[in-house]
Image: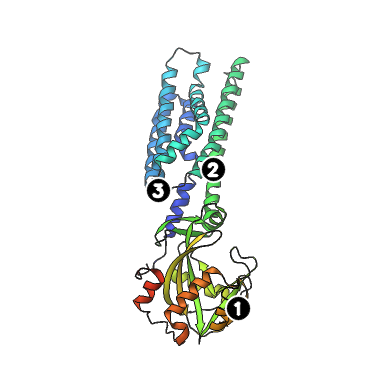
Amino acid sequence: MKSLIDIKKLSKQIRESFLNPVLQFLPLLVFLVVDDFCGISLAWKISFPVSLILLAYIYFLYNGIFIWHLIFTTVFLMVTVVSAMVELLPLDPNITLVVPEAVSAAFLLGYLVVRKQIEQVISQAMPKLIPMTNNFHELYRVVITVFSVLVSYIAGSFLLNYFDLVDSDSQKLLIYAYIVIFICLIVYEVLRVHLVRTKLMAEEWWPIVTDQGKIIGNIEHKTSLKDDKKYMHPIVRVLLIDKGLVLLQKRSAESVSFPGMWDTAISNHVKMGETIEQCVERTAKERYSITNLKYMFLANYTGEVEPESYYAFLFVSCQETEFIVNLEFADQLKWWTQQQIEDNLESGIFTDIFKTEYDLLLRSGLLETGKCECSCKLKEVIYQQSNGTKKEELN
């Protein structure tokens, strides 16, 4: 079976969800710095190609948020055009010196004033699967920083003019400090975004599926469990049987769902970049030190528990092997007879998920016959009874 979702897609989603906000400001920062040293004409010639290169970069590597970056390129062009027009006016040379910074600050102030309305319009224009919340938050943080630096630079320039220090080394020192701050901002954001992305890639991510098992996205597992919205995630479940006995685990008291209750022996969430088989084998090894577990597919079904919904891949295994229980996941392991299970089925000691699976197991006839060849296939009618539809091939 193929991986439920390519890990490269997760990496791409993380990059698009945590785009370095400096990339959106880089053409403008280049324009402002070059203008202060060489004038607006050369600032145009250098910053405009930078904006085109960034557009191509975003298009090929972050195409999901290309519209998001295109908006910033448009704003950059508007700032440069307005700055050029204002500089043509007969203004005091000392005022002309800070015109690009003043125009840029005015645009940023405008964004801060109507921030919510702008974000709402952009959210509607962006693909629904691209989470923009982080990008909006990062943008707001950097807009505040850049706006503060621009206002401070403008205020410093007017103070130097007031004290008639414009032609002194103080003006150069102000410009150098202004540039160093922007360079430090760029370096800080590059390092910060890299660390955030690295940390997110190291987290455990779960695919999000529909009730037909179709992948529609993914989410960090802690976020999923805390979110008010219930996402549906794929899980694997393996019923271990032997001569009419069913092996059950008593879930740890610290379990998120059904703590301290008896449940199917092998159960786990499928991780990003992991196949169904890999998840089964990983779980068997982690929890019981079982390697080379042999099992057969029984059914798919959906359900819902307190923190989430799930799309289950249910398997049966009759391999006789020794178990070493990892107490981190289960407090106890026990073989149950069919009579013991049925006597306690409504006592509240079993999870609702296991009760569903026990019914599927009874329908299969495997428990009564005690025969389970892991290479065998169940009759089509079993799948129809279990799922209500014909069995689909697992991808």
Coordinates of residue 338 in the picture (x, y in percent)? 53, 82
Measure the C-alpha gap from mark 3 to mark 1. Answer: 49 Å
**Mark 2, secondary structure of its residue:** helix
Q: How many marks?
A: 3
Measure the C-alpha gap from mark 2 to mark 1. Answer: 50 Å
Coordinates of residue 88 in the picture (x, y in percent)? 42, 16
Coordinates of residue 100 in the picture (x, y in percent)? 48, 24
Q: Are the residues flagged by discs 3 and 2 in contact, CB closer than 8 Å?
A: no
Q: Which mark is residue 278?
A: none
Measure the C-alpha gap from mark 3 to mark 2. Answer: 18 Å
- 196 and 289: which one is in front? 289
Q: Earlier in the sequence, mark 3 or mark 2?
A: 3
Q: Amino acid at mark 2?
A: Glu
The residue singled out by tag 1 in the image is 333
The residue singled out by tag 2 in the image is 189
- Residue 59 seen anywhere in this rendered image of the structure: yes
Q: Quadrant of residue 164?
A: top right
Q: Amino acid at mark 1?
A: Leu
User: Label 3 crowding class (10 Å Cα cut-off): few <14, some 14-19, many 20+?
Assistant: few
Q: Quadrant of residue 265?
A: bottom right
**Mark 1, secondary structure of its residue:** strand
Instruction: Give the position of the C terminus as an image quadrant.
Output: bottom left
Q: Is residue 160 left or right of residue 132?
A: right
Q: Are the residues flagged by discs 3 and 1 in contact, CB closer than 8 Å?
A: no
Of badges 2 and 1, nearer the viewer stands: 1
Q: Earlier in the sequence, mark 2 or mark 1?
A: 2
The residue singled out by tag 3 in the image is 61
- 379 and 225: which one is in front? 379
- 41 and 204: which one is in front? 204
Q: Earlier in the sequence, mark 3 or mark 1?
A: 3
Instruction: Give the position of the N terminus as an image quadrant.
Output: bottom left
What colour scheme does the image use? rainbow
